[in-house]
């Protein structure tokens, strides 16, 4: 039979109330008593009744994380960072995949499954600005991503426009004049692709370089295969370029493979810069120069912001937008700017 609170108290030689206080991390307990109780818990393999605890406290000790696709490296790394930050705070994370589908994202926001958690960190991909009212929910919610702005919940995101401009200026500073883009979305303004393309265009304008539609590679998904296909299409058209800005690292890695297959040398013939600083970017050949958008900070801040809301019971308080800082990670696929201070 499973061990009980009474069994732990008897083995540790303390009251049931003392065991309960240790489990709930009550601060005013002598260290020796706490150690005795914890040893008894470990020896008996006692597992607290979380359901009963949640009924008493009104909290579950769990939060939800919704991401489009754990098969995408960025979201897998994001989920790992969120879980790590939550574990440090003593909270469990339940992960949902939406497939980036708008209907599934909307259904999730209304799902009764969320009653098993105290709040939600939500990375939307299918929803758009027209769905902003759907974020007005009765539980603590932190939004990630770049699909919806100005909503009723806290929003933790990255500086897409500024970071993309810096990446483009990095290439310009190294002497590149014809910078192709891989991963643009037709007609998108709000969203990662639209915002990063805007930053790219700003950099061209500041440096008096023309915007050339012929070297913009459009695609839908941001996988390696899409990056490779997009690059092959540019190469087949015979357009000239001496650098590539992949709107994420997986696109850039796919594009780099296609360049190498075509006989182009990276970075001698074509410099390549990505965006996201995925772990795999440092192990490609050549290693990928990229934008670090502050993903670990985003994960930690999202968790802490959500837990603060839960602790205060303040799901409907004034919404905040929290922006991560970014940096350019210099590696082998793009040489550094010729002159210091270019950025």
Image: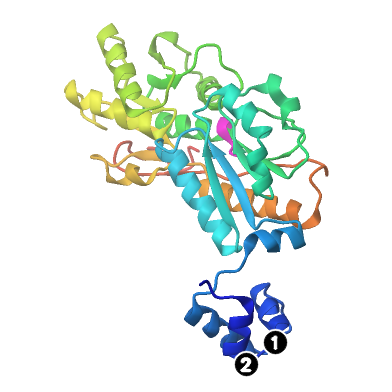
As drawn, the label of residue 13 is 2
Q: Quadrant of residue 85?
A: bottom right
> How busy is the neighbourhood of tag 2: few (under 14 within 10 Å), some, or many (20 plus)?
some
Callout 2–callout 1 Cβ contact below 8 Å: no
Residue at the spot 60% in from the left edge and 22% down from the top edge: 103
Q: Nearer the viewer, residue 184 or 137?
A: 137
> Closest to the observer: 33 or 227?
33
21 lies left or right of 331: right
Picture layout, residue 206 above or below residue 97 = above
Residue numbers of the magenta segment: 157-161
- Classify residue 232 by image quadrant: top left
Q: Which mark is residue 15?
A: 1
| Point 63% across, 85% down: residue | 9
The answer to whether one can see residue 174 in this image is no
Q: Secondary structure at mark 1?
A: loop
On screen, residue 204 above or below 11 = above
Image point (67%, 75%), residue name: 25
Q: Residue 170 or 20: which is nearer the viewer?
A: 20
Residue 49 place in picture, x, y as percent: 62, 65
* Residue located 54% across and 24% down the image: 101
Query: Tag 2's secondary structure?
Result: loop
Q: Position of residue 318 (x, y in %)?
A: 82, 42
Q: Is residue 158 magenta?
A: yes
């Amino acid at each position: 039979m499973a061990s009980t609170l009474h069994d732990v108290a008897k083995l540790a030689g303390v009251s049931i109330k003392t065991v309960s206080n240790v489990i709930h991390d009550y601060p005013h307990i002598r260290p020796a008593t706490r150690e005795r109780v914890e040893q008894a818990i470990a020896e008996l393999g006692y597992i607290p009744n979380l359901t009963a605890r949640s009924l008493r406290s009104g909290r579950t000790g769990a939060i939800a994380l919704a991401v489009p696709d754990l098969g995408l490296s960025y979201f897998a790394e994001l989920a790992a960072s969120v879980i790590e930050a939550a574990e440090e705070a003593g909270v469990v994370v339940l992960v949902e995949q939406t497939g980036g589908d708008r209907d599934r994202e909307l259904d999730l926001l209304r799902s009764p499954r969320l009653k098993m958690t105290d709040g939600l960190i939500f990375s939307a991909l299918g929803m758009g600005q027209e769905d902003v009212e759907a974020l007005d929910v009765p539980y603590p919610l932190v939004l990630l991503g770049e699909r919806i702005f100005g909503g009723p919940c806290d929003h933790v995101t990255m500086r897409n426009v500024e970071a993309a401009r810096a990446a483009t200026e990095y290439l310009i500073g190294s002497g590149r004049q014809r910078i192709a883009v891989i991963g643009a979305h037709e007609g998108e303004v709000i969203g990662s692709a639209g915002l990063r393309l805007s930053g790219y265009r700003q950099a061209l304008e500041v440096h008096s370089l023309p915007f050339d539609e012929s070297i913009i590679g459009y695609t839908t998904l941001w996988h390696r295969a899409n990056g490779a296909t997009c690059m092959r299409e540019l190469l087949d058209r015979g357009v000239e370029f001496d650098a590539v800005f992949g709107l994420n690292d997986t696109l850039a890695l796919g594009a780099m493979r296609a360049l190498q297959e075509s006989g182009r040398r990276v970075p001698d013939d074509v410099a390549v810069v990505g965006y996201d600083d995925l772990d795999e970017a440092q192990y490609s050949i050549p290693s990928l120069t990229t934008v670090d958008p502050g993903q670990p900070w985003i994960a930690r801040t999202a968790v802490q912001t959500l837990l603060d809301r839960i602790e205060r019971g303040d799901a409907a308080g004034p919404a905040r937008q929290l922006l991560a800082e970014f940096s350019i990670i210099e590696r082998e696929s793009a040489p550094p700017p010729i002159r210091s201070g270019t950025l």
